[in-house]
C-alpha cells in the first residue's frame, strides 16, 4: 500500500510539473498585443513585403516566441503573412471555420474594419500539443491598408 501511495504521489508531482511547464510555454494577452504593435512598427519601417516575409519565416526572432506568432490577412480574406504555416500565404481563407463553427477570418475582418482592433475568442488546435484549446486572438488594422495583423494566445484552463 505504501508503494502504491508513493507511486501516486510521484505521478501527481510529475503531472503538476508538466502542467506548470506547459503554462510557462504559453504567451499572455499582453505579450500578444505587444507583438502586434511591434509588427506594425516593423511594417512601417521595413515596408509591407519585407515585413510579411519576416513574419512568415519559421523561427525568426522576435516574430516567433513559444506558441506566439503573427498572421495577417487582407479584407478579402487572402493570407499575407503566417508565422505558423508560411504555405498559407496568398491563400484565400475568408470561409475558414473554427472547430466551434465561427467564421474566423470574416469575424476578424469585421472587427478590424468596424472597430480598428479587438479580441476574438475561438477554439483552435495548439501548434505544439495539437489539442483543441480555447484561443484568443488580438487583431489590429494595418494603417494605410485594407488588411489586419494579429497574434493569438492559448488560454490554459479556460
Image (spheres, helix red, strand yellow):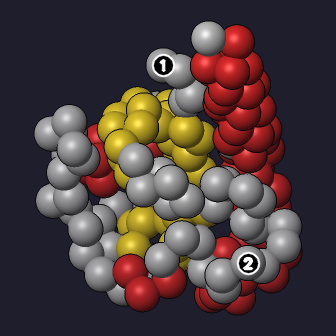
Give the residue at mark 1.
Answer: 158
Q: CA distance from mark 2 to mark 1?
A: 28 Å
Residue 12: x percent and y percent? 66, 22
Going 78% across and 79% down the picture, which residue do you hit? 60
Crowd rating for badge 2 (residues with CA inside 10 Å; few <14, some 14–19, many 20+):
some
The answer to whether any part of residue 68 appears in the image is yes
Which is more toward the observer, 137 or 48? 137
Q: Earlier in the sequence, mark 2 or mark 1?
A: 2
In the picture shown, does residue 61 fall above or below 94?
A: below
- Report x, y in % for residue 125: 39, 51
Looking at this view, is 15 or 92 the one in front?
A: 15
Number of numbered discs overlaid on the protein picture: 2
Q: Residue at x 21, y 58 (%)?
A: 96
Q: In the image, is 105 to the left or to the right of 145?
A: left
- Viewed as shown, does residue 32 lie left or right of 121? right
Q: Which image quarter: residue 18?
A: top right
Compare residues 44 and 73 and report the one nearer the observer: 73
Q: Which residue is mark 2?
A: 59
Indicate the secondary structure of the residue bearing disc 1: loop
Q: Position of residue 119 (x, y in %)?
A: 50, 31
Left or right: residue 127 versus residue 43 is left
Give the left or right position of residue 30, taking residue 91 as reference: right
Quarter location, residue 38: bottom right
Numbered disc 2: secondary structure: loop
Residue 5: % across, % down? 66, 14
Q: Tell me what residue is drawn at x 48 percent, y 77 percent.
A: 85
Q: Residue at x 53, y 21 (%)?
A: 157
Amino acid at each position: 500500500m505504501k508503494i502504491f501511495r508513493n507511486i501516486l504521489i510521484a505521478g501527481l508531482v510529475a503531472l503538476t510539473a508538466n502542467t506548470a511547464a506547459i503554462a510557462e510555454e504559453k504567451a499572455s494577452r499582453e505579450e500578444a498585443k505587444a507583438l502586434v504593435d511591434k509588427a506594425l512598427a516593423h511594417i512601417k519601417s521595413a515596408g509591407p513585403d519585407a515585413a510579411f516575409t519576416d513574419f512568415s519565416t519559421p523561427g525568426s526572432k522576435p516574430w516567433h516566441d513559444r506558441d506566439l506568432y503573427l498572421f495577417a490577412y487582407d479584407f478579402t480574406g487572402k493570407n499575407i503573412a503566417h508565422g505558423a504555416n508560411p504555405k498559407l500565404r496568398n491563400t484565400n481563407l475568408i470561409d475558414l471555420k473554427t472547430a466551434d463553427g465561427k467564421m474566423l477570418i470574416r469575424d476578424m475582418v469585421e472587427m478590424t474594419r468596424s472597430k480598428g482592433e479587438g479580441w476574438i475568442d475561438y477554439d483552435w488546435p495548439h501548434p505544439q500539443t495539437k489539442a483543441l484549446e480555447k484561443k484568443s486572438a488580438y487583431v489590429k488594422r494595418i494603417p494605410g491598408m485594407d488588411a489586419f495583423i494579429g497574434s493569438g494566445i492559448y488560454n490554459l484552463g479556460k
